[in-house]
């Protein structure tokens, strides 16, 4: 499914979005040289139902964040004789991401925002077309893409698993919850996140007292009396774990983790991918003017902003900030500025964000949040760094495996 998004054509309740939110943005026509063409590539949503009826079914994850950022960029770009255009492609689950990516590049998009998972992102990075463009990773947390599999033209606006694990670990250490137990799913993604938490424990002085792997048998939450089976099964599964201060559940596919809060053998808080979670963005975040971004996004998309939407929004805004500050639409000039010490971008997270020189990962605060309220923001007080406390999250320069 292909499409080109232009803010003046996006409609909201019968009125154009541009007329509703940015009155008077019609500028004089600009030359083709002043157009910045951005491609968005995402993956079609699968058939899996959300774990709860409270969860919305989202089939436009990421692309709505990119659309909002294009409109934001054009609000400033009109004064700079710049026009930002977004071309979108959503790849079917059994589709060819590499072919779709080539189509975007052939259409003139030399900035690409990817909301693809790691395997599909690797597919597009392996194409000849990837060499002449800049790709922003807004969808994959794989640490390998920031280390041994890094690319000189690959930038990351979504946090890595290491960053997420470090953010939660810092909070645990600040709270003096030093002893952790892990329940890990059996997917490859779960194993990678478990590795990140083991690394964080060594890094910040936590101790993992025990681990279990969830056997991935289905729990009949919608069957009559299904909650009784959960109430019996989960505590028995956990009863042999050594004592711990907090139970870390690792279930990136959202298959079983939501059953664990309030069902543990010992009365312990649950954190990880469920319960208390680390995330780049959350609907409960209200500080630093975040409510403004929530409201603008909800007016456009009719739903909450997800972390993927936020990562896509940051990526497109970084392009816009670079183009505005350099007064240029030239890719090399904008990239040089984005990677310079002068670049910083306000993203409603307190301090401005910027990109790390060693792996091109966005250095950013991480929210530590429950379902309805933000509990904290990492990095935590007392975790020091010679240049930026934000670099205490994830792989620092001396630790990087990126040689490009």
Image: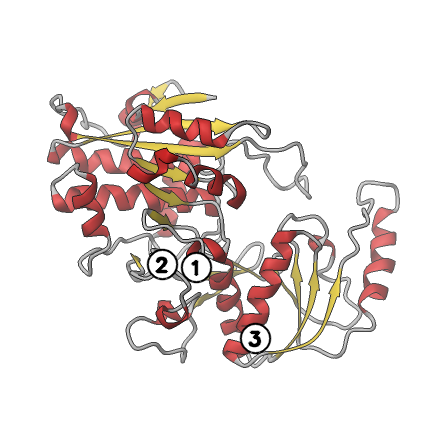
Which residue: 40% across, 32% down? 300
Q: What element carries label 2?
A: loop
Q: Of the numbered discs in the image, which one, if any, rests on residue 359?
A: 2
Task: Check the image and report above or below for 274 versus 88.
Answer: below
User: Do the residues bearing badges 2 and 1 touch, measured as CB atoms within 8 Å?
Assistant: yes
Q: Residue furthest front?
A: 128
Give coordinates of residue 337: x percent, y percent: 18, 51
Residue at horizontal 34 percent and vertical 44 percent from the top: 315
Q: Quadrant of residue 84?
A: top left
Q: Name the residue under label 3.
A: 201
Residue with the mark numbered 1:
147
Between 6 and 13, the one lying in front of the other is 6
**Labels 3 and 1: the sequence-earlier one:** 1
Dot 1 lies on which element? loop
Q: Quadrant of residue 344?
A: bottom left
Give the quadrant of the C terminus: bottom left
> Which numbered disc, 3 or 1, marks the residue closer to the eye?
1
Task: Answer with left or right where residue 130 lies relative to residue 98.
Answer: left
**Residue 337 seen in the figure:** yes
**Badge 2 or badge 1: first in the primary sequence:** 1
């Amino acid at each position: 499914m292909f499409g080109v998004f232009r803010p003046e054509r996006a409609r909201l309740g019968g009125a154009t979005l541009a007329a509703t939110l940015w009155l008077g943005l019609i500028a004089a026509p600009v030359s083709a040289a002043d157009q910045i063409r951005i491609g968005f590539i995402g993956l079609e949503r699968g058939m899996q139902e959300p774990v709860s009826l409270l969860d919305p079914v989202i089939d436009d994850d990421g692309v709505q964040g990119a659309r909002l950022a294009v409109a934001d960029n054009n609000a400033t770009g009109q004064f700079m004789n710049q026009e930002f255009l977004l071309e979108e492609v959503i790849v079917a689950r059994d589709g060819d991401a590499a072919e779709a990516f080539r189509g975007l590049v052939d259409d003139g998009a030399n900035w690409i925002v990817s909301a693809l998972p790691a395997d599909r992102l690797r597919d597009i990075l392996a194409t000849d077309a990837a060499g002449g463009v800049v790709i922003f990773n807004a969808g994959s947390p794989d640490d390998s893409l920031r280390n041994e599999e890094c690319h000189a033209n690959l930038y990351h606006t979504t946090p890595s698993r290491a960053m997420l694990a470090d953010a939660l670990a810092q909070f645990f250490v600040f709270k003096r919850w030093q002893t952790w137990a892990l329940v890990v799913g059996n997917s490859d993604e779960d194993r990678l996140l478990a590795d990140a938490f083991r690394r964080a424990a060594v890094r910040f002085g936590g101790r993992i007292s025990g681990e279990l792997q969830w056997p991935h048998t289905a729990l009949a939450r919608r069957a009559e009396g299904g909650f009784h089976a959960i109430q019996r099964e989960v505590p028995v599964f956990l009863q042999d774990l050594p004592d711990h201060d907090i139970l870390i559940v690792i279930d990136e596919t959202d298959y079983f983790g939501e059953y664990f809060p309030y069902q543990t053998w010992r009365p312990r808080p649950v954190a990880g991918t469920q319960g208390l979670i680390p995330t780049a963005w959350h609907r409960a975040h209200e500080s630093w003017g975040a409510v403004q971004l929530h409201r603008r996004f909800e007016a456009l998309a009719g739903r909450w902003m997800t972390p993927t939407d936020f990562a896509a929004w940051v990526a497109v805004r970084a392009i816009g900030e670079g183009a505005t500050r350099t007064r240029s639409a030239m890719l090399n000039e904008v990239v040089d500025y984005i990677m310079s010490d002068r670049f910083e971008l306000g993203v409603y997270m307190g301090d401005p964000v910027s990109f790390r020189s060693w792996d091109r990962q966005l250095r950013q605060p991480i929210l530590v949040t429950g379902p309805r309220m933000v509990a904290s923001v990492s990095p935590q007080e007392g975790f020091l760094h010679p240049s930026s406390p934000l670099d205490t999250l994830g792989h620092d320069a001396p630790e990087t495996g990126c040689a490009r």
